Image: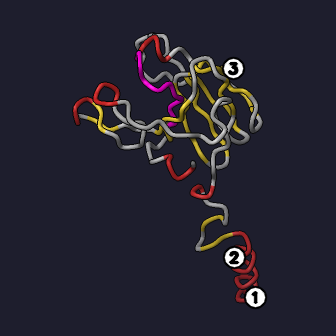
Amino acid sequence: MKTAILLVALTVLSADHVCGQPKSSKKEVKFGALCSGNPSNRKRECDGARYGCGHFGASRGGGKSKHKGLDIVCADGDTVNAPFDVKITRRAIPYGNGNAIDNGVKLEGEGLCFKLFYLKPDKSSGEVKKGQPIGKLLPMQSVYPGITSHVHVQMCDESDPTQHF
């Protein structure tokens, strides 16, 4: 009898899991369009020595630190949308210096936890459906003149978000 119960339990587990993990893993999740003016989620390239590059792990501070996120091109004032159904859990402040772009949100959805920086959120908590507005990109040019304006995507665990784009 114990063998039969174990067999049934393993069969049920294998139908929903692969190698003990849920079939839909975090690696399979892809972000929908974040910025109203960039439906393909084009990534920020390099803006020269002054501002560096937008890819995960890019050098910062003359090599003293690494970029902890991925920058997605977005024009100042453009609408930033939910990449999939998300829950906004709180505000997220990137610098803590109160400058014109020192704002953002922490979100959860599709098994992921991530932050979006440099936007003025429409709200600091609650549910947002895929494609619905989360907020507006703040005036990045007022803080970093000449940089390619962008929304910064950073995973809560500081892992590389590139696989989701």
- The Cα–Cα distance between marks 1 and 2, rounded to whole angstroms, is 15 Å
Question: Residue 102's x, y, as percent?
Answer: 48, 17
In-image side of 51 versus 124 (left or right): left
- At a point 63% along the width and 45% down the height, the residue shown is 31
Camera-side residue of 127 and 129 = 129
From the image, tell me which residue sits under label 1: 4
Mark 1 vs 2: CB contact within 8 A: no
From the image, tell me which residue sits under label 3: 123
Question: Quick one: SS at disc 2?
Answer: helix
Indicate the amino acid at tag 2.
Ser
Q: Which quadrant holds residue 55? A: top left
Indicate the amino acid at tag 3.
Lys
Q: Between disc 3 and disc 2, whose residue precedes?
A: 2
* Magenta stretch: helix, strand or loop mostly: loop
Q: Between disc 1 and disc 3, whose residue precedes?
A: 1
Q: Name the colouring of the figure.
A: secondary structure
From the image, tell me which residue sits under label 2: 14
